[in-house]
Image: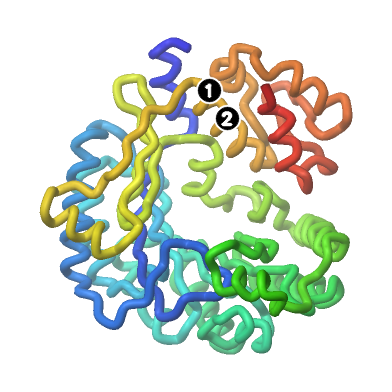
């Protein structure tokens, strides 16, 4: 693969910035994200560290246009609006922002956090993503959430009044949930939705409270595979019918309302990751690198303050690494993989594997893209194993 093609490749996806706020009020039992509960947080100290990291990465990416900023966590809506404003002011000072830049902040739907929404908007946030997760109080308690359905609805109404773009998350295939329950809940959610929904099947991850309960046989009432598959089918049917088709395996939006930041990941653009445990993909002088930072918040903060740098990993990605990542990310999208870009990255290496998947109806080729079929989308992981097999 030529250096020129490597250098140009990230431009097809764009350039974004991810900022990780690692703190939560409580740890949800299903969550395997890098989140921590802390009694006291010196937010000004954290803001100063974020500014140092922004300066460092901006110096390395001088001249780039920033397409998106995403505050994730953890629970970024625990940040004071003044801190978000301070961080975004530094971002604007260090990069040129696209005219349609998307600036998203993840939020929990409690009344306290909803009270900060106008402050976030004034700081420059133009999209919020709310972790609603369930539309009944019994399941919210089982999921360890700290809000009620009534509080979530009120917070959502506040968000809708403040922001033009509002998304929220739901988890399905929960304990004791039936297909009929999920269909009703999905209709209720879509009656509220503005432009975007993220709909995730509950996954029992190791090293979580749910994982420990499951291993001891104490996590009862989970749907079997057939019932979970039925809920997947209901999700596709109902969202398509009501104008929120899937543009990615777990994400649904009205036309034009797709998350630009997350689409940047799936289209394999470059992105800088700032904060504890944040990952990045950055291209310098024709070579793409994977970056990582320390998971522990205290270690990350100490490294930035003492050395001016938090990055612990900067590994160069081989041509094979880049091809595999592009395929794994791009086939999650309904649009699929750009054929010209795939050819540039693979030089035909995967052609036979792809042809087999087309022959059995799992993939389809259009004039410009390679994508999964309706039959293939639920078994994407199996397709990826076949496509990427040696």
- Give the alpha-carbon distance from disc 1 to disc 2, as whole Å: 6 Å
Residue, x 24% and y 49% (percent of image)? Answer: 310
Percent position (x, y) of residue 184? 80, 76
Pointers 1 and 2 in contact (C-beta within 8 Å): yes
Instruction: Describe residue 293's horizontal placement relative to residue 130 as left or right.
Output: left
Percent position (x, y) of residue 206? 58, 62
Percent position (x, y) of residue 339? 64, 21
- Near mark 1 (Cα within 10 A), the count class, few <14, some 14-19 or many ≥20, is some
Q: Which residue is mark 2?
A: 324
Locate the C terminus and report the quarter of the image it occupies. top right
Local secondary structure at mark 1:
helix
Instruction: Describe residue 294's horizontal placement relative to residue 199 as left or right.
Output: left
Residue 92 in view here = no
- The answer to which quarter of the image holds residue 189 is bottom right
- Near mark 2 (Cα within 10 A), the count class, few <14, some 14-19 or many ≥20, is some
Q: Quick one: which residue is furthest to the left in this view?
A: 306
Q: Quick one: which residue is furthest to the front in this view?
A: 216
Q: Which residue is mark 1?
A: 320
Residue, x 67% and y 83% (percent of image)? Answer: 139
Question: Relative to residue 98, is residue 74 depicted above or below?
Answer: below
Residue 292 in view here = yes
Local secondary structure at mark 2:
helix
């Amino acid at each position: 693969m030529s250096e020129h093609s490597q250098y140009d490749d990230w431009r097809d996806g764009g350039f974004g910035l991810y900022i990780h706020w690692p703190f939560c009020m409580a740890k949800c039992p299903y969550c395997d994200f890098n989140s921590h509960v802390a009694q006291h947080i010196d937010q000004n100290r954290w803001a100063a560290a974020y500014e140092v990291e922004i300066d460092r990465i901006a110096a390395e990416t001088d001249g780039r246009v920033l397409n998106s900023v995403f505050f994730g966590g953890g629970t970024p809506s625990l940040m004071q609006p003044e801190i978000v404003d301070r961080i975004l002011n530094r971002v604007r000072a260090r990069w040129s922002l696209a005219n349609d830049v998307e600036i998203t902040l993840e939020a929990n739907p409690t009344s306290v956090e909803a009270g900060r929404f106008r402050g976030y908007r004034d700081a420059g946030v133009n999209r919020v993503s709310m972790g609603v997760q369930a539309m009944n109080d019994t399941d919210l308690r089982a999921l360890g959430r700290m809000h009620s359905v009534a509080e979530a609805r009120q917070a959502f109404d506040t968000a809708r009044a403040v922001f033009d773009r509002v998304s929220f998350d739901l988890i399905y295939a929960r304990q004791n949930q039936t297909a009929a329950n999920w269909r009703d809940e999905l209709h209720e959610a879509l009656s509220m939705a503005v432009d975007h929904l993220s709909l995730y099947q509950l996954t029992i991850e190791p090293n979580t409270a749910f994982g420990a309960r499951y291993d001891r046989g104490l996590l009862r009432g989970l749907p079997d595979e057939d019932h979970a598959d039925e809920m997947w089918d209901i999700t596709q049917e109902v969202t398509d019918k009501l104008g929120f088709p899937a543009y990615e395996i777990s994400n649904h939006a009205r036309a034009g309302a797709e998350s630009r930041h997350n689409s940047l990941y799936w289209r394999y653009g470059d992105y800088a990751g700032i904060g504890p445990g944040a990952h990045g993909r950055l291209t310098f002088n024709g070579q793409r690198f994977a970056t990582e930072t320390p998971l522990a918040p205290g270690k990350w903060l100490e490294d930035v303050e003492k050395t001016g740098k938090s990055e612990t990993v900067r590994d160069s990605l081989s041509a094979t690494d880049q091809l595999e990542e592009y395929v794994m990310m791009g086939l999650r999208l309904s649009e699929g993989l750009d054929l010209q870009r795939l050819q540039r990255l693979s030089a035909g290496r995967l052609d036979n594997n792809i042809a087999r998947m087309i022959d059995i109806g799992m993939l389809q080729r259009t004039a410009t893209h390679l994508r999964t079929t309706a039959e293939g989308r639920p078994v994407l992981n199996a397709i990826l194993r076949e496509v990427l097999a040696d």
